[in-house]
Image (tube, rainbow, N blue to C red):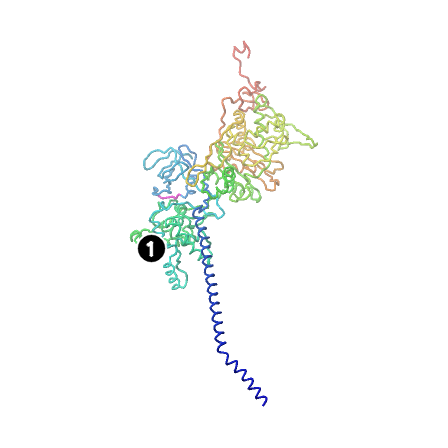
């Protein structure tokens, strides 16, 4: 019973809770509804803030992209590397040149040989000793050279006539365009020739737009129709066969973005394309595209833009290209390496023909034109593995550094016209490699440096800085500093002969042993190369046979300070230390410095500082600087003429006499060998060029070579193939030739067996006759009145 009562009681309590639940449920639903609305409101507010934040972020990001676009477009879009050119070959009647060099120059410039009279510029035809050359039009400094057909006739390695074939008139001078030899590139290595929209043929614009972006002039930077069309085509093909990118998108990717394949990059590309079209008109965008597109590679130089591509592949500006050539360039946009006409000719032809067919279908060309054009072979300019000239370019950069910042050279599009003679450079390089292979194959680490210059102007014509001439490492021509040995002797004897009262070629010098003690008690005993003493020898013979002891004694007598001043007067920048050993070349010098010194000797005492840059213009051709030959005389003409004559005899009968049998023209020069045969030198000159060769090891170990057995072989080899003039001693009016008895140094005559004709400054020749000489009989007046 109790249990039931309990149950009832319990039931009553439960019932009372159930009885009150509708009101509570209503209140609860109201509370839940309010809470839900507040949550929904909060969620909506959060979403709104999220959307607003995203929108703000998008605006900020678009603003960032906008600034990025405008900054690049309004500023300097491209860094334009300086273009470095060789000298311009000038031909005129009397010019020394042979057929081998003419063909070398034409090949370097990309001219093609024909079987008959050339029909287009950039072609040549050789028959017998004539060259019919269709010269290209070009601008050289402030002179516009027209395109014209000329006939150049050679006779005995000399230009005998130049004629304009069309008019029959004689031409005084014919100038070829200078060869492009290198560039001073920014890090990315891009090169381009900028063209304006108005310079580009209308037909080319139509071909490009037809092939790459048919709706370019209609879309807003993104072509949704092209994207859809590409998607359908790719789905049907099961692979990517079409792209939907517009020219604007291609430009944005090339200018601002990487080639990374990612969604972020594609989104950026789309936004930036829209912004670019918002800011700039179609003409500006297309002009920029024309100059930006990548179209090939030339060594470390990337070919960008249709302006440079036209010149690189066809040696003509865009405006002068034919339809098939325009179609080829446009076709290469799809893949410049894949459709490279020089490497993949058939592939490039198929791509070209595809573009031509599109042109036919759009009535840009007729069916007949199409058939004619697809039958044409692809002919592009041949670019030989053109030498990079690292040692010469190094010299150019160093000399330009005095006037131009590095950024100017790599970004402002300067044109640098140098003094490099490509043919002379080629022969200098060949001389190094051939000589090492022929004579020194057992010395794989033997190094060589060479400098060749014009001795009348100081123009540097060639520089080799390594046994491997193309190697761009340590430039020994400029930076190796080694003892010069007997190259100093002409300086010592020039100082002596400048004092004509005490020294002449006939002055007898003492060649007996000598020992000198310095302040520390060290004894120096110089010796001749043959370890012999030769008694009394004439100064002329001491120079010709390169005796050491007479040079030391003469130097000490003349004065070490005087020798140092003479050294500097010839062009050296540094004074010499007043040590007796300088008389035998215990002087560290470089090949380029020694070339400057011997240039002064070769130019009759006129010093012209060596220069590698002739002129610099801005990207528009306006002259910024032009080298004026700075010629100064610091040494008298007569003593230099005597030394030059002595050096010519060194090459005939002295230590360099082998040159007389190896070369078919006269030269002058001096051998040089440092202590322990560590360095081999030869310095010499022809009628118009001066050259210095150094040979040695980088670690300064002995080479076992003298000047004549080492460096002179390279010197001789290079001038066997360079078109140069023979050296002919030229004497000023106060020099006269006199017969001298070699044994006594007095006036010679018919009775002397060892006569030699020597030059003297008038009044300085010996006044006495040698005992062997038959003196001319005196007239009766002399007998009557005496001398």
Density class for disc 1 (Cα within 10 Å; few <14, some 14-19, many ≥20) is some
Residue range highlighted in magenta? 111-115
Specify the quadrant that holds the C terminus. top right
Residue 536 appears in view = no
* Snapshot quadrant of residue 551: top right
Residue 126 falls left or right of residue 714: left
Q: Does the magenta stretch include residue 746?
A: no
Image location (x, y in percent) of residue 395: 51, 39
- Look at the numbered disc 1 and give the secondary structure of its residue: helix
- Which secondary structure dominates the residues rendered in magenta? loop
Residues 31 and 454: in front is 31
Residue 554 falls left or right of residue 762: right
Image location (x, y in percent) of residue 265: 46, 57
Image location (x, y in percent) of residue 679: 59, 38
Residue 622 falls left or right of residue 601: left
Q: In this view, does 257 lie above or below 315?
A: below
Residue 541 falls left or right of residue 41: right
Q: Residue at x 55, y 40 (%)?
A: 476
Image location (x, y in percent) of residue 55: 45, 58
Specify the quadrant that holds the N terminus. bottom right
Residue 358 appears in view = yes
Instruction: Determine which residue is flagged by label 1.
Output: 358
Q: Is residue 215 above or below residue 466?
A: below
| Marker count (numbered) | 1
Residues 631 and 209: in front is 209
């Amino acid at each position: 019973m109790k249990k039931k009562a309990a149950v009832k009681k319990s039931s009553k309590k439960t019932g009372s809770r159930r009885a009150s639940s509708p009101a509570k449920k209503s209140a609860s639903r109201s509370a839940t509804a309010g809470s839900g609305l507040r949550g929904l409101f909060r969620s909506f507010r959060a979403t709104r803030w999220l959307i607003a934040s995203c929108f703000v972020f998008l605006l900020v990001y678009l603003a960032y992209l906008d600034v990025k676009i405008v900054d690049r477009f309004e500023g300097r879009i491209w860094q334009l590397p300086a273009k470095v050119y060789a000298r311009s070959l000038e031909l005129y009647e009397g010019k020394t040149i042979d057929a081998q060099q003419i063909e070398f120059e034409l090949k370097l410039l990309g001219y093609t040989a024909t079987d008959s009279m050339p029909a287009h510029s950039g072609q040549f035809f050789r028959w017998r000793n004539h060259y019919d050359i269709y010269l290209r039009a070009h601008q050289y400094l402030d002179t516009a050279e027209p395109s014209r057909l000329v006939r150049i006739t050679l006779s005995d390695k000399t230009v005998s006539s130049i004629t304009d074939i069309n008019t029959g008139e004689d031409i005084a001078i014919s100038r070829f365009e200078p060869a492009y030899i290198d560039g001073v590139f920014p890090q990315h290595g891009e090169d381009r020739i900028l063209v304006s929209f108005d310079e580009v043929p209308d037909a080319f614009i139509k071909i490009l737009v037809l092939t790459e972006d048919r709706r370019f002039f209609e879309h807003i930077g993104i072509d949704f129709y092209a994207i859809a069309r590409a998607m359908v085509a790719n789905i049907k093909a099961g692979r990517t066969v079409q792209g939907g990118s517009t020219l604007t998108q291609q430009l944005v990717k090339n200018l601002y973005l990487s080639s990374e394949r990612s969604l972020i990059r594609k989104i950026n590309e789309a936004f930036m394309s829209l912004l670019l079209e918002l800011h700039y008109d179609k003409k500006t965008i297309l002009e920029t595209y024309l100059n930006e597109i990548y179209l090939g590679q030339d060594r470390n130089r990337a070919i960008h833009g249709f302006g440079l591509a036209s010149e690189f592949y066809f040696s003509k500006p865009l405006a002068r290209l034919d339809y098939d050539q325009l179609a080829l360039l446009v076709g290469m946009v799809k893949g410049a390496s894949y459709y490279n006409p020089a490497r993949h000719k058939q592939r490039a032809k198929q791509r070209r023909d595809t573009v031509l067919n599109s042109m036919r279908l759009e009535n840009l060309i007729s069916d007949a034109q199409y058939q004619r054009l697809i039958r044409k072979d692809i002919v592009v300019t041949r670019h030989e593995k053109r030498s990079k000239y690292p040692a010469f370019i190094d010299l150019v950069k160093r000399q330009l550094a005095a006037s131009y910042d590095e950024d100017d050279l790599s970004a402002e599009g300067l044109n640098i016209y140098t003094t490099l003679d490509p043919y002379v450079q080629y022969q200098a390089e060949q001389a190094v490699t051939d000589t090492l292979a022929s004579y020194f194959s057992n010395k794989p680490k033997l190094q060589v440096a060479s400098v060749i210059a014009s001795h009348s102007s100081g123009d540097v014509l060639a520089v080799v800085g390594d046994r491997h001439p193309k190697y761009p490492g340590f430039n020994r021509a400029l930076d190796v500093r080694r003892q010069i040995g007997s190259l100093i002797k002409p300086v010592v004897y020039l100082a002596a002969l400048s004092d004509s009262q005490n020294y002449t070629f006939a002055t007898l010098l003492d060649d007996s042993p000598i020992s000198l003690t310095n302040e520390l008690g060290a004894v120096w005993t110089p010796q001749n190369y043959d370890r012999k003493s030769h008694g009394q020898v004439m100064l002329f013979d001491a120079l010709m046979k390169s005796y050491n002891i007479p040079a030391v004694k003469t130097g000490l007598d003349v004065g070490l300070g005087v020798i140092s001043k003479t050294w500097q007067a010839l062009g050296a920048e540094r004074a010499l230390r007043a040590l007796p050993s300088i008389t035998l070349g215990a002087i560290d010098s470089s090949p380029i410095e020694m070339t400057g010194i011997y240039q002064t000797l070769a130019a009759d005492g006129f010093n012209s500082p060596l220069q590698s840059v002739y002129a610099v213009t801005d990207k528009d051709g306006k002259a910024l600087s032009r080298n004026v030959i700075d010629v100064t005389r610091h040494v008298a003409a007569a003593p230099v003429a005597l030394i030059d004559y002595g050096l010519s005899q060194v090459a005939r009968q002295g230590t360099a006499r082998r040159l007389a049998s190896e070369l078919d023209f006269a030269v002058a020069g001096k051998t040089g060998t440092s202590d322990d045969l560590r360095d081999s030198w030869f310095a010499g000159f022809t009628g118009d060029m001066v050259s210095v060769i150094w040979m040695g090891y980088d670690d300064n170990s002995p080479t076992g070579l003298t000047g004549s057995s080492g460096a002179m072989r390279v010197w001789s080899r290079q001038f066997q193939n360079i078109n140069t003039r023979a050296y002919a001693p030229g004497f000023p009016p106060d020099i006269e030739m006199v017969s001298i008895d070699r044994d006594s140094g007095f006036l010679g005559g018919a009775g002397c067996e060892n006569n030699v004709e020597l030059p003297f400054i008038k009044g300085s020749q010996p006044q006495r006759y040698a005992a062997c000489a038959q003196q001319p009989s005196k007239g009766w007046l002399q007998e009557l009145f005496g001398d």
